[in-house]
Image (cartoon, rainbow, N blue to C red):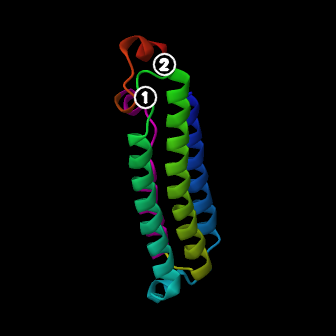
Amino acid sequence: MIRNTQILFLAMLAGQALFAAVAYFFLPANKSAGLADTGLFFYLPFIFMMVMGGAAWVLNDTLKRKAPGQGKPLEERLRHYQQRVLLRLAMTESAVLTAIIFGFVSANIQLYLLAALGVGLFIYFRPSAAEFVSDYQVSVDEEREL
C-alpha cells in the first residue's frame, strides 16, 4: 500500500509539472509585462499557499498524534497513513495549481516561482516507508512484511 501511495505521489508531481509547462508555453508573448503586477493576482495565491501549506503541516501533525499504535492491525495503520499522506498532498497540490493558474491568467512569471516553492513543499511531504515505520511503531516482522 505504501508503494501505491508513492506511485500516486509521483503521478501528482508529474501532473503539476506538466500543467505548469503547458500553461507556461501558452503564456502571452509579453511575459515581462506581468512582472510589474503586484496586486491581487500576486497576493491571493501567496496567501493561499501559506494557508494551505500551514494547514497541511498542522493536519499532518494532528493525524500523526492520532495514529493507531502497535496494538492495531498493520492494515489499519497503513490505511491511516495513506489517508494522512493523501490529505497533506492534496492540500499542497491545490496551492501549487492555484499559483500556476493565477500565473497563467495574469501572465506573471513570479507566480510560477511561487508554484515552484509549493512543489518543494509537496516533495517534502512525499510518502516513505521509513516515515511509516517511525510514526506507526512498526515491529521488525511487520517491517519485513512491507
**Residue most extreme to the front:** 71
**Residue most extreme to the top:** 141
Name the N-terminal-most of marks 2 and 1: 1
Instruction: Pick the residue in front: 113 or 5.
Output: 5
Instruction: Say if the magenta span includes residue 125.
Output: yes
User: CB under 8 Å between callouts 2 and 1?
Assistant: yes
Query: What span is colored magenta in the figure?
Result: 110-133
- Does residue 139 lie above or below 14 as drawn? above
Q: What is the number of the mark on residue 87?
A: none
Number of other residues with Cα within 10 Å of mark 2, as a class: few under 14, some 14 to 19, many 20 or more:
few
Circle 1: residue type: Ala
Residue 51 in view of the camera: yes
Instruction: Say if the magenta span includes residue 126.
Output: yes
Q: Main secondary structure of the magenta part?
A: helix
Determine which residue is flagged by label 2: 146
Number of other residues with Cα within 10 Å of mark 1, as a class: few under 14, some 14 to 19, many 20 or more:
some
Q: What is the number of the mark on residue 129?
A: 1
Where residue 46 sits, quadrant-wise, is bottom left
- Does residue 28 lie above or below 81 as drawn? below
Quadrant that contains the N terminus: top right
**Residue most extreme to the left:** 134
Instruction: Pick the residue in front: 49 or 77.
Output: 77
Residue 2 in view of the camera: no
- Does residue 87 lie above or below 36 as drawn? above
Residue at 53% across, 82% down: 41
Circle 2: residue type: Leu
Looking at the picture, how far across and down is residue 76, in whole percent?
54, 27
Q: Is residue 57 left or right of residue 74?
A: left
Looking at the picture, how far across and down is residue 79, in whole percent?
56, 32
